[in-house]
Image (cartoon, grey):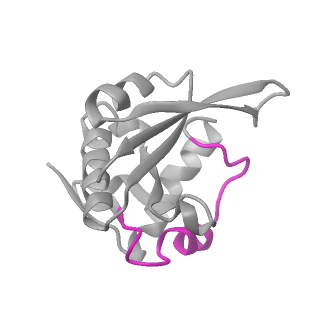
Amino acid sequence: MAIIRQAQPGDVDAMTGIYNEAIRARELTYHAGEQAAEQVRRWLFTTEAYPAYVVEEDARVVGWSALVRFHERAAYAPTVEMFTYVAPAHRRRGHGKALVARMIDAARRNGFHSVVALALSSDPLVPCWIERAGFTKAGYLRLPSTSSDRLAEVTVLQAMVS
């Protein structure tokens, strides 16, 4: 049975492992290199206004999601960016959907106006986010690929929560 709970600093090693697995697979993230647990800790546990949650199966963290500051300029303060990662062996069990729903609710409770998520346009989950989680396509970015000299298209997704 899976449970979702607020992430704790003691979860950082498992969260970092899941995140680095996505980096190595060149999926779901645009970090060019793996992250150290201390970097993830500083990134995710800076303030209560930006919550993070984990999903556990058999007392093991198998996925996580977090809200982080979208942009440093004050005018963007009502918008947060959301990250969601599930270990490959635990995908297609509804964990991502449940985490996204929890984060949308957390954004609303914390007084944010909108949630932004970035995804490779080729990611097959983009239509799922739009259909199931209330996101709309807000635009596209063309960014250099971390695995080639080609440009990759990134879809900017946005959910209005207030």
x%, y% of residue 24?
64, 41
Residue 44: x and y in percent read: 49, 68
Q: Can residue 51 be found in the magenta stretch? A: yes
Q: Is residue 43 above or below residue 155?
A: below
Image quarter of residue 118: top right
- Check the picture and name the quadrant holding the C terminus: bottom left
Name the residue at the left extreme: 1
- Answer with left or right where residue 116 lies relative to residue 106: right
- Residue 49: percent from left, percent from top: 39, 73
> Can residue 60 be seen here?
no
Above/below status of 48 relative to 7: below
Q: Residue at x 24, y 55 (%)?
A: 105
Q: Is residue 17 above or below residue 9?
A: above
Which residue is more in the foreground, 40 or 36? 40
Q: Is residue 13 left or right of residue 73?
A: left
Question: On screen, 93 above or below 64?
Answer: above
Identify the residue at image location x=28%, y=59%: 108
Name which residue lies at 28% across and 61% down.
106
Residue bounds of the magenta highlight: 29-52
Q: Quadrant of residue 148?
A: top right
Report how many numbered discs are placed on residues in the image: 0
Q: Furthest-right residue in view? A: 149
- In reply to whether residue 1 is colored magenta, the answer given is no
Q: In this view of the protein, can residue 16 be seen by the observer? A: yes
Is 120 situated left or right of 108 in this image? right
Secondary structure, magenta segment, majority class: loop
- Quarter of the image holding residue 73? bottom right
Name the residue located 43 percent from the left edge and 37 percent from the top edge.
88
